Amino acid sequence: MQRRHAIILVSVLLVLALGLAGAFLFLPAWQARDPQAIPTAPASPGAASASSAAASDPASAAAAGAPAASAAGLASIRVGSYNLAIFGSTKVARTATLAILARIAQTYDLLAVQEVGSNASTAGDEACEAVLEAFVARINEDAGPGVYAFVRGDQYAFIYRQDKLTAAKAGLYEGREAFTYRPLLAYFQVKDRPLDFLALTIHTRPGLAKAEVPALARAMDELASSLGEADVLCLGDFNADGSYYAEGPGQSLAGFPEARYVTLIPNEADTTVAAASLAYDRMEASASLREDWTGAWGVVRPGSLWDLSACEGGADSAGTERALSDHYPVWAEFSALRDTD
């Protein structure tokens, strides 16, 4: 009996020894993986630009067919703005083009769009409503039934994820400042998180941008006071560059003093498909949002993320980024876990 126990004990020890030897055989290969080779987020995400946004923007995930993350464990939200360039019934009927635009929209929790129906607010409410309903229906074909909804007014809309945000107080601006195309404003609250803010989207008239861009800063202050919400985010096609507007030195947009506002899309950005570098599309935030902004921003070039060869368009735009728009989407990210106003 003792001899049998001894044999069993020796057998067990032999198995353990062989297991440890095998582990040590594989251990060097595991240790050889260089931690420095693992991609990490840039130390200064605010440095993302038109050329680097494809790597840092969530649209890269959507290019692989992945929708935006669900609300579970929500730590931040991504807010975008996109001038859709005369987004009417003709463009909505272009199925391949609409499919790419829908995939772009899914990369954001909140997307402000301009030029719904027309580029000069000439389309009627029924036509604009029909265009938005068709677009959001196409977005939800991919994202899931009822995931995205919208609020709209004139040529503008906010398209947002209902599982992450609630929208209220939506309507066209009726304050003291004068704009050719009155901005759309809405109040948003991140669900089950402290962050809330007012969003204001605008398409300035190019020839009047010199007056309308500074007026946006005053409108932001006015709304913060009248509606009792310090956090105000103004985004859209400001036409704030080139011959339309002198953007100023440095990276902050002229007309928005750094002590009171945060320029999220800096002067260095290139937001149009034109050969020249032009930062027409912008995001300006009240100073109270400074700590809620994660520092991440970007400009998305759809042609670097998706195959656009099937996109319908005109003779000069089909199969190119111009089939989507003559602007690029811009975005910024905000922490949903704090609200420092």
Image (tube, rainbow, N blue to C red):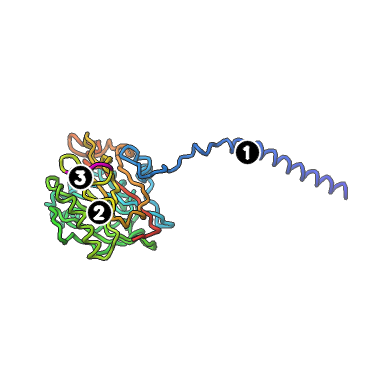
Q: Residue furthest front?
A: 259
Point out the image quarter for the C terminus.
Answer: bottom left
Residue denoted by label 1: 27
Dot 3 falls on a residue whose secondary structure is loop
As measured in the structure, the alpha-carbon distance from the residue carrying label 1 to the one carrying label 3 is 57 Å
Residue 324 seen in the figure: no
Q: Nearer the viewer, residue 339 or 281?
A: 339
The spot of residue 170 in percent (x, y) is: 23, 62
**Is residue 256 a member of the stretch shown in magenta?**
no
Q: Which residue range is magenta in the image?
A: 245-250
Q: Amino acid at mark 1?
A: Leu
Q: Examine the image and state in which quarter residue 227 appears.
A: bottom left
Residue denoted by label 2: 234
Front position among marks 1 and 2: 2
- Specify the label residue 92 is tagged with: none
Residue denoted by label 3: 240
As measured in the structure, the alpha-carbon distance from the residue carrying label 3 to the one carrying label 2 is 13 Å
Q: Residue at x 15, y 43 (%)?
A: 244
Q: Crowding near pointer 3: few (<14 within 10 Å), some, many (20+)?
A: many
Q: Amino acid at mark 3?
A: Ala
